Image (spheres, rainbow, N blue to C red):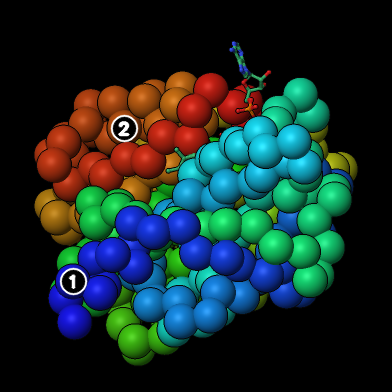
């Protein structure tokens, strides 16, 4: 049985696109139906592979947006000049088929026994695996306190906004909008910096655990900021999405 599970993770499996929903003008959530999906943990990702009519293939990694036990779900931000994300955000329709491989990753995973308090920091689509962690926390009835510091370009770029407006008990959402803010905006209005982290982050005496995800530059600056505040580097978990801007 163990051999079957390992083979399942490493093998490309056919996925059928189920429901799709637009989160923002550039971001779409897709439910993927994978017969025999073996399940996943909060914080893992999958590889998605597309094959063109001429046989050309492209594969990219996408974090899993759903909690363990929920249908496999990804949330993709469109890069206009990208190869894969424009297809997933604009063309993929329910019933279309693609391939997935996974779930992948054991480091950027949160489970109840991982503890907390949790500082979750996201830049742009980096919120995707953190959403899975928040959902999993609710699912298992954990009361670990959570702060989610989430940086977006503008109000209309906020992913999962309806969920973030009503977070579960014990989850505080702190948002910053880096490029433009609506007139009534009461959150932060700049890129995440040392001062913001000092105001938001749990005191180090609480032995917090941090998960930082997003574009490489965001992840590196936030992780360095947290270490500068005294967070032990091994308690700051990072997931880099690449050079995409936020
Ligand atoms: C672990 C992990 C999880 C991820 N999870 C998510 C997620 O949940 N949601 C999400 O939206 N994204 C996620 N990503 C990012 C995702 O994998 C893709 O990188 C993203 O969707 C862009 O892919 P693309 O094919 O559209 O763009 P690409 O074709 O890869 O292009 C990306 C950018 O690089 C530029 N570029 C491409 N090739 C070159 C070149 N040769 N020289 C210079 N510039 C070049 C393009 O112009 C474009 O701006 C994740 C990445 C990782 C590693």
- In what element is the residue under mark 1? helix
Question: Which of 130/74 is in front?
Answer: 74
Question: In this view, which residue lies farthest toward the front?
Answer: 54
What residue is drawn where x is 71% and y is 68%? 17
Mark 2 or mark 1: whose residue is earlier in sequence: 1
Residue sitting at x 77%, y 64%: 96
Q: Position of residue 180 (x, y in %)?
A: 79, 32
Residue 141 pos. (x, y %): 35, 88
Q: Which mark is residue 223?
A: 2
User: In the rendering, which numbered label is found on residue 173?
Assistant: none
Residue 73, image quadrant: bottom right
Q: Name the residue that disc number 1 marks.
A: 3
Q: Is residue 151 above or below residue 110?
A: above
Q: Nearer the viewer, residue 154 or 126?
A: 126
User: In the picture provided, is 105 more to the left or to the right than 156?
Assistant: left
Q: CA distance from mark 2 to mark 1?
A: 37 Å
Q: Nearer the viewer, residue 77 or 212?
A: 77
In the rendered view of the protein, which quadrant contains the C terminus? top right
């Amino acid at each position: 049985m163990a051999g079957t599970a390992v083979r399942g993770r490493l093998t490309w499996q056919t996925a059928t696109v189920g429901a799709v929903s637009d989160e923002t003008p550039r971001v779409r959530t897709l439910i993927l139906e994978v017969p025999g999906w073996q399940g996943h943990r909060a914080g893992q990702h999958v590889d998605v592979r597309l094959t063109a009519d001429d046989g050309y293939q492209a594969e990219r990694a996408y974090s899993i947006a759903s909690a363990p036990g929920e249908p496999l779900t990804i949330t993709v931000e469109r890069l206009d000049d990208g190869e894969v994300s424009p297809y997933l955000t604009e063309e993929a329709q329910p019933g279309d088929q693609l391939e997935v491989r996974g779930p992948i990753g054991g480091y950027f995973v949160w489970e109840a026994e991982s503890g907390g308090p949790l500082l979750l920091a996201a830049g742009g689509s980096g919120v995707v695996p953190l959403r899975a962690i928040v959902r999993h926390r609710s699912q298992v009835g954990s009361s670990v306190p959570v702060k989610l510091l989430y940086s977006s370009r503008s109000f209309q770029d906020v992913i999962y906004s309806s969920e973030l407006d009503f977070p579960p008990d014990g989850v505080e959402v702190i948002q910053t909008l880096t490029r433009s803010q609506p007139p009534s905006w009461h959150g932060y209005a700049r890129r995440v910096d040392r001062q913001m982290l000092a105001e938001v982050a749990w005191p180090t005496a609480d032995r917090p655990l941090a998960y930082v995800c997003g574009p490489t530059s965001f992840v590196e600056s936030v992780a360095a900021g947290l270490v500068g505040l005294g967070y032990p580097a091994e308690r700051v978990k990072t997931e880099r999405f690449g050079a995409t801007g936020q």
